[in-house]
Amino acid sequence: MRVRRHPSRIILMVGALLCQTVVLAGEEIDTSAVKPDADGFRWFDVRLLGVEGQGWRQTKDPFDRLPAKAEGVVRPPVWKLSRHSAGLCVRFSSDAPVIFAEWELTESRLALPHMPASGVSGLDLYVKADNGQWRWAAMGRPTAQKNRLKLITGIPRADREYWLYFPLYNGLKSLKLGIDSQSKLAAAAPRERKPIVFYGTSITQGACASRPGMVHTAILGRRLGYPVINLGFSGNGRLDFEVGELMAELDPAVYVIDCLPNLRGKQVAERIDPIVMTLRKARPKTPILLVEDRTYANAFLYPGKQQRHKQSRKALREGYDRLKAAGVEHLHYLPGDELLGADGEDTVDSSHPTDLGFLRQAVAFEAAIKPLLK
């Protein structure tokens, strides 16, 4: 495919793109080089535009979150969950009045008992408004393992910047955008900022957002203007040393460690020092934010839940104090009591946030992370 060249940094290719070639960030694709379909639409693999949110490019499949070398190294459930596309996204610009999406999922299961298909397996499109604010534009609701639908239609033709989020609890085999033959398509301008890396649980992965753009990690990406790498593994965010070693290969602006919902106090005490020291050895000056578990919405009724919070938070705080006393610098702490609201109205099942819960979490995380980005 021909492209109109101008100076920019190269976005690396993720896997083979058939006859299409990855373009430079901010560069317009020569859409005329692609033959339109019977309806006059031209289709483009999103990898042409540069997938954001991947810490590693050498993946087994194009939309994996961990590198291929992690298979057989991390625990099997972590590897399986890493094939989900949580946190992955693509930014692009177009003047198209109609934008189609065509995507094929790796799993036939579209929804979860407590999470809708729109969040588990759907797409979520945002557009930058004239005032520079990112506004929700459209949602791609899946109805099968293979889907094709109009994300937007009938809007005035004008150059706009878009942000498309990928499914949270399903994987992608392929994802294409379709635009009419008269429209332009370009990769978004490059972002030179380092990413924020989140390592956590099902909540970090996105349970139970109604759509992919409503996870707190995605909200923070829009608010702070930083790329985000989501290493949330449902039920398996357990401070694994192997995951820590992989994270140490990355060079982020901030590491956020949010694993307490999947751990008990004794496990926290045993595992927090090794993972922090692994990251600190590799990245001596990168801020590390340790996060307490959110408070169960109905914990006030259950002494057992109250005790679990008390023990795990005590172990994390003691680990934090121990590491600080040992001279570990750039280590920070976020208490869990204010991650969700005191009204108890922001979870699906007392544990996993609704969209309201994620918005509240984003507020708390933003207050903790923003000073670290300076």
Image: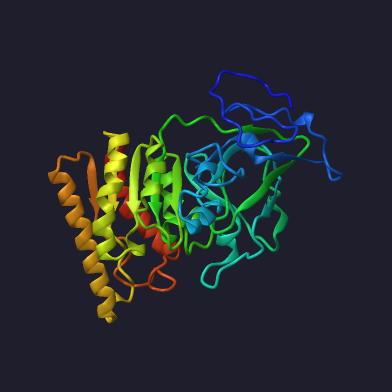
Q: Is residue 40 visible?
A: yes
Percent across and percent down for residue 42 are 77, 39
Horizontally, is 368 left or right of 13 in the view? left
From this view, report whether residue 374 is shown above or below residue 299. above
Q: Is residue 161 visible?
A: no
Q: Quadrant of the C terminus?
A: top left
Q: How many marks?
A: 0
At x 69%, y 40%, the residue is 45
- Closer to the camera in the image, 230 or 368: 230
Percent across and percent down for residue 23 are 63, 28
Percent across and percent down for residue 326 are 14, 43
At x 52%, y 56%, the residue is 81
Instruction: Name the residue at the left extreme.
Output: 325
Q: Quadrant of residue 194?
A: top left
From this view, report whether residue 46 is shown above or below residue 81. above
- Closer to the camera in the image, 2 or 229: 229
Q: Quadrant of the N terminus?
A: top right
Image coloring type? rainbow
Horizontally, is 99 left or right of 332 in the view? right
